[in-house]
Image (tube, rainbow, N blue to C red):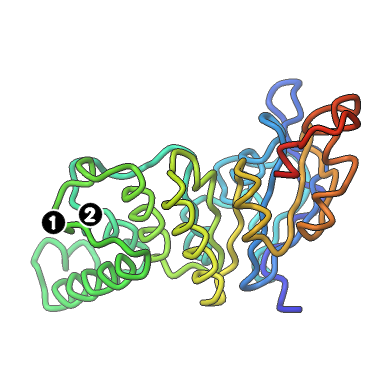
Amino acid sequence: MSKVLLDVRNLAVSFGGVRAVDGLTFSVHEGEVLSVIGPNGAGKTSAFNCVTGFYKPSAGAVTFDGADITGGRPAVIAARGVARTFQNLRLFGDLTVLDNVRAGMHVRIKQNFLDAMLHTPRYWRGEDAATDEAHKWLDFVGTDRDRTARIRNLPYGEQRRVEIARALAREPRMLLLDEPAAGLNHGEKAHLLDLMRRIAGLGIAVVLIEHDMGLVMEVSERIVVLSHGREIADGTPAEIRSDPAVIDAYLGAEEAGSGRTTEVER
């Protein structure tokens, strides 16, 4: 088993009287593909937001590569090697494909204010390096569109690839994907499946929230299932597929015993 990269222990976050995440514990290993699934409102995105610093947990601890990042600022956590995409695309519509990816590298470019103002040699070296890196990751995700085109003019599936390329351009050690298959057609989902495997092949841990159970079962090495903010299962796809608690959380005990194929079993 590879090294534990992310360790979440007894994580909790509340909004008013609502406990969105309640005592969540799980870990992620280097190069592992792990899915976090559960019904709508189960606390999946809230857990992601706690890990990446967008929410401050009310209890528990988040450790990344041995360092406590609990409640840290998003920029600091990103600089440690945690990148993410969002459920809704967060690209800069008026920027080009290339510049959207370059924008993800600001934490890595070694420039200061004077370099940018005076266009020093260090500024141009940084710009050239960022451009080369952006092309590399666009090639990696399989984007063959005009890279000088505005991102808003690309089809939705292509925009998803650019968003992932921008996240990879940060050179993360862990990539969190929030419903990356939403809105994709069959061919685009097949490409995404291959892409996630290739990302993991680089040694980058991939953690995804996803409702497409066919994709989840095919790509995941391990699956964590949430319901009402609590973890109800953690295991391999085969173990999760047959877990009565998981089936019950999706459909209810009465329907689970009816013989109908559940969302988890598809």
Residue 226 in the image: above or below residue 169:
above
Q: What separation in Å lies between label 1 and label 2 (alpha carbons)?
A: 6 Å
Q: Quadrant of residue 135?
A: bottom left
Query: What residue is shown with label 2?
Result: 97
In which quadrant will I find the N terminus? bottom right
Is residue 260 visible from the viewing direction of this image? yes
Image check: 72 left or right of 111? Answer: right
Which residue is labeled 1 in the image?
148
Dot 2 falls on a residue whose secondary structure is helix
Residue type (three-letter) at the residue carrying disc 1: Thr
Q: Residue at x 68, y 48 (%)?
A: 36
Amino acid type at image mark 2: Val
Dot 2: few (<14), some (14–19), or many (≥20) neighbours within 10 Å?
Answer: many
Q: Position of residue 230 (x, y in %)?
A: 81, 39
Which residue is at the front of the view, 63 or 226?
Answer: 226
From the top left corner, tell me how far across and down residue 5 is, in percent. Answer: 67, 69
**Quadrant that contains the C terminus:** top right
Give whichever of 164, 122 is nearer the camera: 164
How many neighbours does mark 1 have within 10 angstroms: few (below 14), some (14-19), or many (20 or more)?
A: few
Q: Nearer the viewer, residue 63 or 98?
A: 98
